[in-house]
């Protein structure tokens, strides 16, 4: 079940929701629906029809990771001495009831939304404790067929522009994400190729 609005920051909530969407997981809310304050704080996340479209789409693949950092970070509020580094698994904390898990500093996911590379969703997740710049090459996304690609920001529901070969999300906050819809740019598209990076907007 989703944990948006439950002990998560706004950035963590939308990254969590985006991760569920891009791997086709059931979108079952678990927060108190009678708590108006909680519902209001995450309303734009859980009612984002473009994110939900990614979740509901089926184009032959449920979505999966395609890239990750070589370095890991441990997600926990407390780390006992002697437990500095673990590889991709949850571990019980022997000195408390907490658990902690190691994850990549960043991880990238994709999901085909339409056949033949016509539409592909990409989620770039920053798991690190500070902001990061996240970049990827279009050729590294398995279902993408374009070198000149039109990109739309799913979180803001706005078109960003047409980009060639690569894309960069700048200043992605800790535990935040960049959620994109990518499609081939039409041959007659007269937009100039955008060489700039894009900053992720906070709420």
Image (cartoon, rainbow, N blue to C red):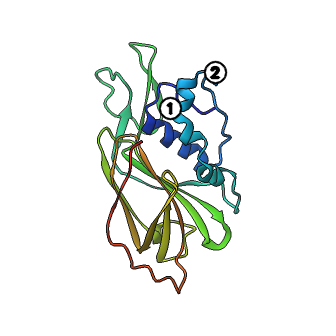
Could you tell me residue 179's position as x and y percent?
49, 53
User: Is residue 23 in sight in this rendering?
Assistant: no
Question: Is 114 situated left or right of 182 in this image?
Answer: right
Name the quadrant of the N terminus. Answer: top right
User: Is residue 11 in sight in this rendering?
Assistant: yes
**Would you name the residue on which mark 2 appears?**
34
Name the quadrant of the C terminus. Answer: top left
- Could you tell me which residue is drawn at 34 percent across and 21 percent down? 78
Could you tell me residue 93's position as x and y percent?
42, 19
Classify residue 11 by image quadrant.
top left
- Could you tell me which residue is drawn at 54 percent across and 41 percent down? 44
Question: Is 78 situated left or right of 34 in this image?
Answer: left
- Secondary element under disc 2, as helix, strand or loop, is loop
Question: Is 195 situated left or right of 178 in this image?
Answer: left
Classify residue 135 by image quadrant.
bottom left
- Secondary element under disc 1, as helix, strand or loop, is helix
Mark 2 to mark 1 CA distance (whole Å): 13 Å
**Would you name the residue on which mark 1 appears?**
41
Could you tell me residue 17's position as x and y percent?
55, 41
- Could you tell me which residue is drawn at 58 percent across and 21 percent down? 35
Which of the marked residues, 2 or 1, is nearer the chain's N terminus? 2
């Amino acid at each position: 079940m989703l944990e948006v609005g439950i002990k998560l920051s706004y950035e963590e909530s939308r990254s969590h929701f985006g991760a569920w969407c891009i791997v086709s997981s059931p979108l079952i809310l678990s927060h108190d629906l009678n708590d108006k304050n909680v519902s209001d704080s995450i309303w734009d996340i859980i009612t984002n029809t473009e994110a939900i479209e990614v979740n509901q789409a089926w184009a032959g693949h449920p979505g999966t990771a395609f890239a990750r950092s070589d370095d890991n970070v441990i997600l926990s509020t407390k780390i006992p001495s002697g437990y500095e580094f673990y590889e991709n698994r949850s571990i019980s904390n022997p000195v408390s009831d907490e658990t902690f898990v190691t994850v990549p500093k960043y991880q990238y996911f994709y999901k085909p939304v339409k056949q033949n590379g016509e539409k592909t969703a990409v989620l770039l997740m920053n798991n690190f404790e500070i902001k990061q710049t996240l970049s990827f090459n279009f050729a590294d996304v398995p279902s993408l067929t374009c070198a000149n690609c039109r990109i739309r920001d799913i979180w803001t529901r706005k078109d960003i522009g047409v980009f060639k070969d690569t894309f960069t999300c700048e200043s992605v906050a800790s535990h935040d994400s960049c959620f994109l819809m990518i499609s081939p740019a039409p041959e007659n598209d007269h937009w100039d190729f955008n060489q700039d990076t894009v900053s992720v907007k906070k709420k």
